[in-house]
Amino acid sequence: MITGKYPSLRLRRSRKNDWSRRLVQENNLSPNDFILPIFLIDGKNKKQLIKSMPGVFRYTLDKLSPIVEKAIKNRLPMIALFPYTEKKKKNIIGSEALNEDNLVCRAIQLIKKRYKNQIGIMCDVALDPYTSHGHDGLLKSKYVLNDETVQILIRQSILQAEMGCDVLAPSDMMDGRVGLIRKSLDKNGYKMTQILSYAVKYASSFYGPFRDAVGSKGLLKSDKKNYQMDFKNSTEAFREVALDIKEGADMVMVKPGLPYLDIIKLVKENFKIPVIAYQVSGEYSLLSNGINNGLVNKDIILESLIALKRSGANAIVSYYADRLDKILE
Ligand code: PBG
């Protein structure tokens, strides 16, 4: 019998005990890695379940405090606000976006007044919650106009910055908007307001439940392929990120998350900028499996979140971020 030679290298050695597995662990998650999206709705005393997203709700402003307080207590660095807009407030140009008394503006003011800088506030810059056709910009013969849309997005950005928003997140995918928003913020005295650009945003069918959550689902005619990226492409992501960095983005987003790990890795390895992954609504719904609090497959959720981190995400926008105590335990 040959002794001593049989594999001297045994990778299972370090896997044998829990302490040892913990010792060689390469990736982990903490609350610092998460951004919590919060859906807002007008009215009073409502916590309204979003049917396509079990465990996720829309809140009226009077119900917001406990959610924000819990996020602060759990040390989440940031929340992202998304409004459900009533049909009667929508029109073809999305003018509610520029109403200084709109739901998002009121929410920012309320949160900033009560909680100051204990938590960051991020807001989307795009018109889709406000347009009667559900597109992110102005529509002409089924085409979303670029430069005309950007002019409105600049005004939406300034307004949200003025209300106290810390991080503006253009999610519209118009060309050139990051640079113009940055310039205009600086000129108007908001030089410390950050821009998290949705730089690599694919035209994805994984956004379905979100469109339901903000009330644009039934309204959306056709798709967003003339402005969001084709999911058959990856090198195009380089160009999008390079441009947004040049235009002044502080952070960039890759979206969706789990089906796009290759893209997250590619962006992380090629650019020295914080990369945020968005675990989108469709991913949430799939992982939550149609079950009440959305937490039945806890191990699968954790594994998916770690995958995003392992691929290179600095942080993750996740609808699970209000239940991390149960997922990361
Ligand atoms: C709007 C926006 C979308 C999402 C975030 N911001 C939807 C879209 O572009 O149609 C999707 C988020 C999600 O699915 O969780 N511009």
Image (tube, rainbow, N blue to C red):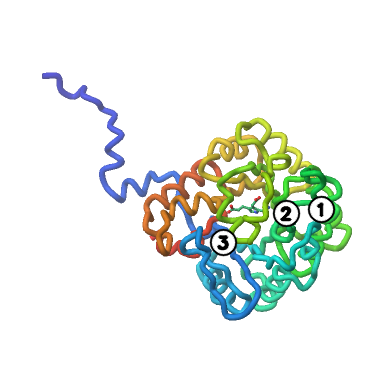
Mark 3: give few (<14), some (14-19) or many (20+) Cα within 10 Å.
Answer: many
Q: Is residue 67 visible?
A: yes
Name the element at disc 1: helix
Mark 1 residue crowding within 10 angstroms, few (<14) / some (14–19) / many (20+): many
* Ligand 1 is within 8 Å of the C-beta of the residue at disc 1: no
Return the residue nearer the eye: 152 or 187. 152
Judging by the rendered image, the residue that carries numbered circle 1 is 181
The residue under label 2 is 133
x, y (%) of residue 227?
A: 73, 42
Give SS at disc 2: loop
Q: Is mark 3 on a helix, strand or loop?
A: strand
Q: Where is residue 329 in the image (x, y as percent from the top left)?
A: 38, 60
Q: Which of marks 1 and 2 is nearer the N terminus?
A: 2
> Which of the two labelled residues, at mark 3 and mark 1, occupies the earlier sequence position?
3
Residue at 50% over, 49% down:
283
Q: Residue 149 carries which label?
A: none
What's the CA distance linking mark 3 and mark 1?
A: 24 Å
In the rendered image of this protein, does residue 224 appear above or below residue 9? below
User: Mark 1: which amino acid?
Assistant: Ile
196 in relation to 55, above or below: above
Q: Disc 3 vs disc 2: which is toward the camera?
A: 2
- Give the mark nearer the N terminus: 3 vs 2: 3
Q: Mark 3 — residue?
A: 36
Q: Where in the figure is residue 171, as x and y percent of width and height?
A: 70, 51
Whether residue 194 is visible, yes or no, is: no
* Most distant residue in the left direction: 1
Q: Are marks 3 and 2 in contact (CB under 8 Å)?
A: no
Query: At 61% across and 55% down in the image, what residue appears?
Result: 211
- Residue behind label 2 places its C-beta within 8 angstroms of ligand 1: no
